[in-house]
Amino acid sequence: MAMPVSAGWLVVLAGFFGVMVSFGSLPVFTFGTFLTAFGCAAITVAICSPALDKLLDRYGPRLQPPWDC
């Protein structure tokens, strides 16, 4: 039984052929994807910064979590 192909693998395949044919075409067609990912990361940092600021003020920046050995 054949497994369905995910849309993510089609993007990887398109990127592979884009690099194989010409590296110059890859940034042109994938710029929106990277811009969206950067925008999501920037919004996440903006939302988490106040809470992280209070934690760093209280505990300091050198506290190591117990699960990070």
Image (cartoon, rainbow, N blue to C red):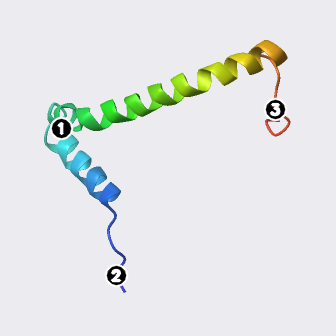
Residues at discs 1 and 3 in contact (Cβ within 8 Å): no
- Compared to residue 68, the image places residue 16 above or below, namely below
Q: Earlier in the sequence, mark 1 or mark 3?
A: 1
Between the residue at mark 1 and the residue at mark 3, the CA separation in whole angstroms equals 41 Å
Comparing labels 3 and 2, the label whose residue is closer to the camera: 3
Q: Nearer the viewer, residue 47 or 34?
A: 47
Determine crowd level at label 3: few under 14, some 14-19, many 20+ residues with C-alpha closer than 10 A: few
Residues at discs 3 and 2 in contact (Cβ within 8 Å): no
Residues at discs 1 and 2 in contact (Cβ within 8 Å): no
- 23 on left or right of 63: left
Quarter of the picture holding the C terminus: top right
Type of the residue with mark 1? Phe
- Compared to residue 66, the image places residue 51 above or below, namely above
**Measuring 18% from the left and 38% from the top, which residue is drawn there?**
29
- The x, y position of residue 65, in whole percent, is 81, 32
Determine crowd level at label 2: few under 14, some 14-19, many 20+ residues with C-alpha closer than 10 A: few
Q: Nearer the viewer, residue 58 or 64?
A: 58
- The x, y position of residue 12, in whole percent, is 30, 51
Q: Which mark is residue 29?
A: 1
Q: Earlier in the sequence, mark 3 or mark 2?
A: 2
- The x, y position of residue 63, in whole percent, is 82, 22
**Measuring 24% from the left and 37% from the top, which residue is drawn there?**
30
**Figure quadrant of residue 9:** bottom left
- 29 on left or right of 1: left
Q: Which mark is residue 65?
A: 3
Q: Which mark is residue 2?
A: 2
**Figure quadrant of residue 4:** bottom left
| Label 1: element kind | helix
| Label 2: element kind | loop
**Figure quadrant of residue 27:** top left
- Compared to residue 55, the image places residue 29 above or below, namely below
Type of the residue with mark 2? Ala
